[in-house]
Amino acid sequence: MAEKATLKSCLKSAREELARGEYKAACQHCKAALKVDKNSYDAFIVIGKAAFKLEEYSQSEMAYRKAVGIQPEKLTAWQGLLELFQSMDSNEKTLEALQELTKLTNSDKARCAEYTKRLAFGQKKAGDLEASGATWQQLLDLEPPEALRASALCGLADIQIAREEEMVVEEVRMRSKKALKALRSAAKEAGKDPEACVVDEGKLHEEVVAARAAQPASESAELEAALARVAAATAVSAEHEPYHTAQLRRVLARAKADPSAQGEALEHCLAASRKQCCSVFPYDCAVQLQAELHLIRSTEEVGAETAALEQERRSREAAALSKRYLHAFPWAAGSATAMGCALAARKAVSAKPRATTERQQLEAWLARGAALDPAGGSPAGCCILAVARLEAGEPAAALDYCKQGLRAAVRFRASVGVTLSGLDRQLRLVYCDALAQLGRSADAISTLSAMLPSLAARSRLVDLALEAQNLPMALEHCQAANEQAPAVAWPVARRGWVALLQGSAEEARRLLEESLSLAGGESDPVARYHLGRAYWELGGKLKADRACALTQLMTAAGKAGPHQ
């Protein structure tokens, strides 16, 4: 009984000294306790803690391990060893402690999940990706809280990212070796120093990453799946944003390889913007892709029309995106651009001309976006501003915006990896329109000729030829466009106008009626005006009076246009 009292007294004194920071004194009291009971678990625990504070790590480890040997089912000794091994930066021993703690806490899901998470991180740090992946999967099997589940999903994604990088590095090494061999062989044949040849491995790395991302069915499928699980389970917070961005960049890489995948990329961007996104990246991509796919591409080719309901839906989608962007990042240049693009989308689907104040509001938002952007604006914003300045009779300003927009399109392609071919083409078309208004028709024709076989470019070339009264050139481009796209109405309509100018009213009537038939319900008012002129020239040969000509002219006048 006296020995038990002495043991308790010694341990109490040891704990008091430990609390006061008198670590050596605590050790002395513990040694006295061990003389009473050489298997005192608590004495070895206090010695382990005191020695740790004194940075006597070997003694601390020895004391904790003796405690483990006495009562292996208790956590305290292994917790002390975990703290010790982490301070020693011994990853191998840290993993040992974590493995034991996960076993000992098996009945306590919350504590076990926390130790399992730390074990998985440690295994990844040690380079054991297989073990780390298995541990993360064990954590998921524990059905942990949402935060830990998200950590497990991110951990599995990290492993797949690391594996993917290993594969990329290996492929870059092989390509670099092959490219260097070819360069040295070519240099030797040219009589140059082969040793001076250098391969741009940075560029090779970008090419390999883009190529692998563009093939989700390859060995990158596991990475795709891991990133998709993270994206589905988490918001785009600061902690999880890298995973969402990694997934989005892979989708964008596919869009670079296959432009038809741009719709998928846009949906990913919009989905990210709806999830409390903390990054402007998906917003900016969404704004430009919306303009590319909906605002520009759907109207860039003459005769290509989108259903009114679909256009209205897209307009609402653009408005919703702009509001989310402005709410999340009111200071960002992109949010102002998004507001301007949304107003432009609404203007595009409106059946009546917008009020002057609304047009001014549109331009004000876009100008603000361009002013806030250190680089000078976005492709979509500059394109819309260029069109607005051209309509306002300011071709010089339109020309400047086109140049800014083309530079912005190059920057977007470099940073995001997607070519905005529709915006690029539209900027060049507006650029040519501005050149023509400035009296530089020859420069406009040269630029448009370089854009062939674009139907929109051919349409502009026909207009320029007609303005210059170069009917053979106009007819040549009309016939080429007709062969290129037989179902498109405008080449047939322009051929009809050329025929009328050449004095062939009957041929003009036939071609213009054919163009209206091709156009269906979306007939061009200019074509109707020309048909009215043709009927007028024919007079009573086809009709008892000229009522048909009057009908066509009135129909043309019913829509806004240069011939209203």
Image (spheres, grey):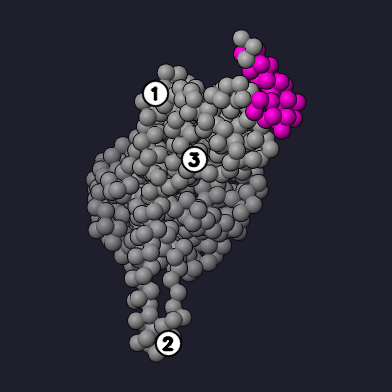
At horizontal 47% and vertical 33% (from top left) the residue drawn is: 98
Measured in 3D between alpha carbons, the distance from the residue under mark 3 to the one under mark 1, in whole angstroms, is: 25 Å
In this figure, which residue is indicated by the disc labeled 2? Answer: 192
Give residue 375's quadrant in the image: bottom right
Of all residues, the one furthest to the bottom in this rendering is 191
* Boundaries of the magenta span: 4-32
Label 3, residues with CA under 10 Å away: few <14, some 14-19, many ≥20: some
Marker disc for residue 93: 3
User: Does residue 10 show up magenta in the picture?
Assistant: yes
Q: Position of residue 32 (x, y in %)?
A: 66, 25
For marks 3 and 1, the one nearer the N-term is 3
- State the residue at coordinates (42%, 60%): 205
Q: Which mark is residue 142?
A: 1
User: Which quadrant is home to the N terminus?
Assistant: top right
**Quick check: can you spot residue 148?**
no
Q: Amino acid at mark 2?
A: Lys
Residue most toward the top? 1
Q: Which sits in the foreground, 159 or 495?
A: 159
Nearest the viewer among 306 and 264 is 264
Q: Nearer the viewer, mark 1 or mark 2?
A: 1
Q: Secondary structure at mark 2?
A: loop
Main SS type for the magenta part?
Answer: helix
Q: Is residue 68 above or below residue 543?
A: above
Q: Residue at x 34, y 65 (%)?
A: 174
Whole-number angstrom distance, CA of label 1 to CA of label 2: 64 Å
Q: Amino acid at mark 3?
A: Lys
